[in-house]
Image: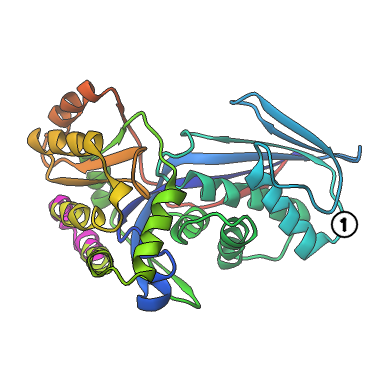
Amino acid sequence: MIIRSKAPLRLGLAGGGTDVSPYSDLYGGAILNATINMFAYTTLEPTDDGKMVFESPDRKLREEYDSAECVDTDGFFVLHKGVYNRIVRQFTHQPLSFRIASYVDVPPGSGLGTSSTLVVSILGAFVEWLKLPLGEYDIARLAYEIERVDLGMSGGKQDQYAATFGGFNFMEFNKENVIVNPLRIRNRYADELAHNLVLYYTDTSHVSAEIIEEQQKNVRAKNSQSIEAMHKLKEQAVQMKEALLRGNIDRIGEILDFGWRYKKQMASSITNPRIDGIYNAAKEAGASGGKISGAGGGGFMFFYCPGVTRYAVVEALQRFGGKAKRYEFVNEGLKTWTM
């Protein structure tokens, strides 16, 4: 028997950072994101040899352990082990024997929610194998707890919910709840957005935890500039929702540019001279706005390019050594199946 799962990566279109505590606990957060056809994949094979094997075929990494109720979360497979430990502690109450392999379509630190999406994919494989009675909200919440509470990794809440639910979603966050509002975006609006929104990999990565910790520190210290910037980003999420639902697609560049001005004020390490250079070059070539994807500091950026300006923008960005990536939006979230 082979169990497989896949979960989609996401573009955080607006409101990024307002899903992070303590801001979301104190003021409430709002984010608009959409999933794309890049995925985190997991394959799980139950075994009866008393072993646990973790593999990453693309990186040629492998770790093997004797089956146990808990495995130390060190080495290369921290996320996998975190999921396993929670599954045993909360559901099976006994060791499991299996082989598990995973793969993600983009490198770590890309800003597309890779770590959280991988957690959702791994968790989905265990849910499929053990037939656990968990719905979408349950899986997303459990993935969040594994990553943020069990493993102590800094970050927000949007990625786990985006990967689990899929599609275009307007998400609301407070101390107690996450509410996912699926948006019924007309196909032609989504197609126009995908055509005009250039996704560009800067060929660098970032450590999101460090940026998020600085952002959290600013909120705790009541840094007025940082908090006001997050208020503006929450407004940006509402503006983005209205533009998408009404089909005012060419307003999206302006909305992205508005958000980028305030996002840079949340933490000093969100941007750097190279990122600023890329952003300015894209605008000079015809983009009306854009942003860095994820926490900042590196990874993917995207730019709204009205009309046929995408071709000039892609050409202008070639000198920075990165690469524009084609993609499409997808409506399905986590998928699992057994063979």
In the image, what residue occupies the spot 27% across and 43% down?
Answer: 194
Q: Is residue 169 visible?
A: no
Residue sticking out furthest to the right: 49
Q: Residue at x 29, y 40 (%)?
A: 301
The image quarter containing residue 267 is bottom left
Q: Give the percent coordinates (x, y) of residue 246.
A: 19, 63
Please state the horizontal and vertical placement of residue 86, each as a whole percent of the image: 72, 58
Q: Is residue 166 visible?
A: yes
User: Of helix, strand and loop, which mostly describes the magenta segment?
Assistant: helix
Q: Is residue 153 above or below residue 196?
A: below
Instruction: Name the quadrant of the C terminus.
Output: top right
**Picture layout, residue 94 above or below residue 98:** below
Instruction: Indicate whether residue 247 is drawn in magenta.
Output: yes
Viewer-nearest residue: 104 or 233: 233
Question: Closer to the camera, 272 or 199?
Answer: 272
Q: Position of residue 12 (x, y in %)?
A: 34, 52
- Residue ID for mark 1: 94
Q: Is residue 20 left or right of residue 267?
A: right
Compared across the picture, whether 33 is left or right of 154 comes to: left
Quarter of the view holding residue 192: top left
Indicate yes or no whether the magenta region holds residue 224: no
Region in magenta: 240-253
- Secondary structure beneath label 1: loop
- Residue drawn at the location 56% of the way across and 67% of the way down: 137
Q: How is the image coloured?
A: rainbow
Above or below residue 2? Residue 222 is below
Q: Amino acid at mark 1?
A: Gln
Residue drawn 25% across and 55% down?
263
